[in-house]
Image (spheres, helix red, strand yellow):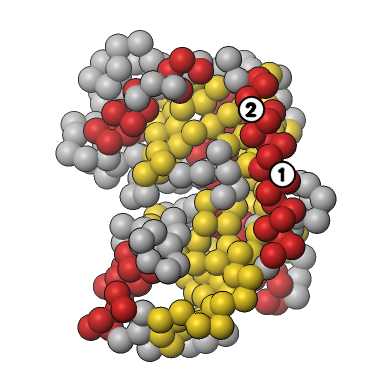
């Protein structure tokens, strides 16, 4: 089989885009999972955090399906949908579009560059729910906001929310970030455990200063990533709930892959989060394989977007320096 791919990243969170609008590929569900596990393998010649299948939609301009590197499907991906936003807007030659995801149809649009000459897109992150059943989280209370989970840690205060994929967030200082606490908790809640039957994304968040936070995420189905878009959005909301930032104000969110900007709307007792950040192309290529020996796939015609890489590297360096100067 022959397929075309575009490698793209949002905040260093990288994906392989497979366009099923321009090319009528036919994949079974098992084949989608197998493609993700094989092509995303970092030991292979490609490697990525996941696959973004861009598909025709009956209710929007395009449909996005996200498969993690372990072959599992995610309900949403904030960094991934930025990549899809750019791809679809350029494909359809429009500035705004509607993208169908597993649980909602989301608005996306081209936005003012977050850094000079870096393609930037705004994507809607919703719906937002604090109901524990929506994660799901097995505890007695219907919500968990700034509360301890004794079985996980005796000191940290956690907030659980779905946006719509599940997130567990806690505010910490540099000492906790430098410890192995996050890795220990994350591996536990994403294995057999009594709290999260489907696993959960775990973010440790530090307040850098008013209007700026740092987020590090252990992503369900992936592990530690350079960034997770929905985690950064959810973390911004949690920082607001704790009084460090404000609704209807831009918050700069730093991560190991760079930075994004978030804006939390609150209207009619509902939250909606705008996630604004890069959608940077890495390369395009052709991939060929046979299904019974897919691990022996071949990559040809790889064309790099070198200027985009150079410009994003500058953003990364500035973001890293800022975090080092403000993280305490």
- C-beta proximity under 8 Å, tags 1 and 2: no
Return the x and y of residue 186 as percentages of the image width and height: 32, 34
Residue 224 at least partly seen: yes
Left or right: residue 191 versus residue 254 is left
Q: Is residue 198 above or below residue 250?
A: below
Where residue 43 sits, quadrant-wise, is bottom left
Q: Which mark is residue 59?
A: none
Return the x and y of residue 97 as percentages of the image width and height: 68, 65
* Residue pictured at 74% horizontal, 53% vertical: 311
Where residue 326 sits, quadrant-wise, is top right
Residue nearest the viewer, comparing 208 with 163: 208
* Residue pictured at 23% horizontal, 20% vertical: 151
Measure how far apart labels 1 and 2 are at the Cα level.
Answer: 12 Å
Where residue 88 sits, quadrant-wise, is bottom right
Q: Earlier in the sequence, mark 1 or mark 2?
A: 1
Residue pointed to by mark 1:
315
Left or right: residue 325 versus residue 71 is right
Find numbered disc 1 in the image and state the secondary structure of the residue it sits on. Answer: helix
Find numbered disc 2 in the image and state the secondary structure of the residue it sits on. Answer: helix
Residue nearest the viewer, comparing 147 with 292: 292
* Residue pictured at 56% horizontal, 77% vertical: 302
Residue pointed to by mark 2:
323
């Amino acid at each position: 089989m022959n397929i075309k791919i575009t490698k793209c990243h949002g905040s260093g969170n990288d994906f392989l885009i497979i366009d099923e609008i321009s090319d009528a590929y036919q994949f079974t569900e098992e084949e989608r999972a197998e493609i993700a596990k094989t092509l995303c393998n970092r030991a292979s010649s490609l490697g990525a955090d996941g696959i973004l299948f861009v598909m025709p939609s009956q209710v929007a301009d395009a449909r996005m399906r996200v498969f993690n590197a372990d072959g599992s499907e995610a309900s949403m991906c904030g960094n991934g949908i930025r990549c899809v936003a750019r791809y679809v807007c350029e494909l359809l030659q429009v500035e705004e579009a509607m993208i169908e995801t597993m649980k909602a149809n989301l608005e996306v649009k081209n936005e003012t560059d977050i850094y000079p000459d870096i393609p930037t897109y705004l994507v809607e992150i919703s719906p937002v729910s604090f109901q524990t059943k929506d994660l799901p989280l097995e505890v007695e209370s219907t919500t968990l906001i700034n509360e301890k989970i004794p079985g996980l840690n005796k000191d940290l205060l956690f907030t659980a929310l779905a946006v719509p994929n599940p997130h567990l967030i806690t505010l910490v200082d540099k000492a906790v970030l430098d410890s192995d606490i996050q890795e220990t908790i994350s591996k536990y809640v994403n294995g057999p455990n009594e709290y999260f039957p489907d696993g959960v994304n775990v973010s440790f968040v530090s307040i850098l200063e008013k209007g700026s936070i740092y987020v590090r995420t252990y992503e369900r189905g992936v592990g530690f990533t350079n960034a997770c878009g929905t985690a950064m959005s959810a973390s911004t909301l949690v920082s607001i709930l704790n009084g460090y930032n404000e609704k209807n104000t831009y918050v700069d969110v730093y991560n190991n892959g760079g930075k994004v900007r978030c804006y939390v709307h609150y209207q009619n007792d509902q939250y909606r989060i705008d996630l604004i950040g890069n959608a940077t192309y890495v390369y395009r290529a052709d991939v060929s394989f046979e299904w019974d020996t897919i691990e022996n796939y071949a990559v040809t015609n790889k064309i790099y977007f070198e200027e985009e890489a150079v410009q994003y590297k500058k953003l990364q360096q500035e973001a890293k320096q800022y975090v080092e100067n403000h993280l305490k």
